[in-house]
Amino acid sequence: MPDKKPLQSSIIFYQTEDGRTRIQCRFENETIWLTQALIAELFQKDVRTVNEHLVNIFEEGELSREATIRKFWMVRREGKREVARDVEHYNLSAILAVGYRVRSPRGTQFRQWATARLSEYLVKGFTLDDERLKNPPGKGHADYFDELLERIRDIRSSERRVYLRVREIVESINGVNMERTNNA
């Protein structure tokens, strides 16, 4: 059922590094919501192409419509009049899925960015948005800094195991050195 109440969401702007694309994104319930038109603008494709990819994503079972689509009551200008209607918005999972399917320079740029983040995660075991962590989001928005600190504390508490392992290695090296000294 569509939401016909004033939205308690945040509007954030995404701008590509080259500054050629700037998109107004709705951030609500810890996800981004975009219309098909905005997804098309993001990846510099026609809305029909985005629609085709979304149909395939749902038909192939990659995502479910129910989990990724939400209707928002919007007022927008159509010609000289303002019209209020339900407009389907797609969450971040759907946006990412389209991004992996579109063929465009912007789609390629997106895949390179996403692959770099995934590679960093696989190699290092983590990836961070340093700027977001340095600059708190403000009142009324989720701040994951405390969660990050707690996870770091938990990981650091396991350093005991690393210390014990290093100690075993040093003791074995000392044992080898002692044998060499005795044999000399």
Image (tube, rainbow, N blue to C red):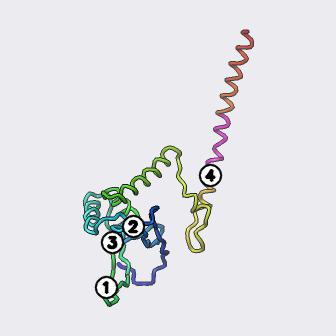
Q: Quadrant of the N terminus?
A: bottom left
Type of amino acid at the residue the image marks with label 4: Ile
Label 3 SS: helix
- Magenta span contains residue 62: no
Of the numbered discs 1 and 3, the one sitting upstream in the chain is 3
Looking at the rendered image, the disc whose residue lies closer to the viewer, 2 or 1, is 1
Type of amino acid at the residue the image marks with label 2: Asn
Q: CA distance from mark 2 to mark 1?
A: 25 Å
Q: CA distance from mark 4 to mark 2?
A: 30 Å
- Horizontal arrangement in the rendering, residue 7 relative to residue 152 (left or right): left
Q: Would you name the residue on which mark 2 appears?
A: 91
> Which corner quadrant of the image does residue 72 belong to?
bottom left
| 172 is higher (above) or lower (below) than 59 | above
Looking at the rendered image, the disc whose residue lies closer to the viewer, 4 or 1, is 1
Q: CA distance from mark 3 to mark 4?
A: 40 Å
Q: Residues within 10 Å of mark 4 (few under 14, many from 20)?
A: few
Label 2 SS: loop
Of the numbered discs 4 and 2, the one sitting upstream in the chain is 2
Of the numbered discs 3 and 4, the one sitting upstream in the chain is 3
Q: Who's the residue at 69% across and 31% down the image?
A: 167
Query: Which region shows up in magenta?
Result: 155-164
Q: Who's the residue at 45% across and 62% down the image?
A: 18
Quick check: marks 1 and 3 in contact, CB under 8 Å? no
Which label sits on residue 78?
1
Question: In the image, residue 2 lies at what x, y percent?
Answer: 36, 79
Q: CA distance from mark 2 to mark 3?
A: 13 Å
Q: Which residue is situated farthest in the top direction here?
A: 184
Q: Would you name the residue on which mark 4 appears?
A: 152
Question: In the image, residue 133 lies at what x, y percent?
Answer: 59, 61
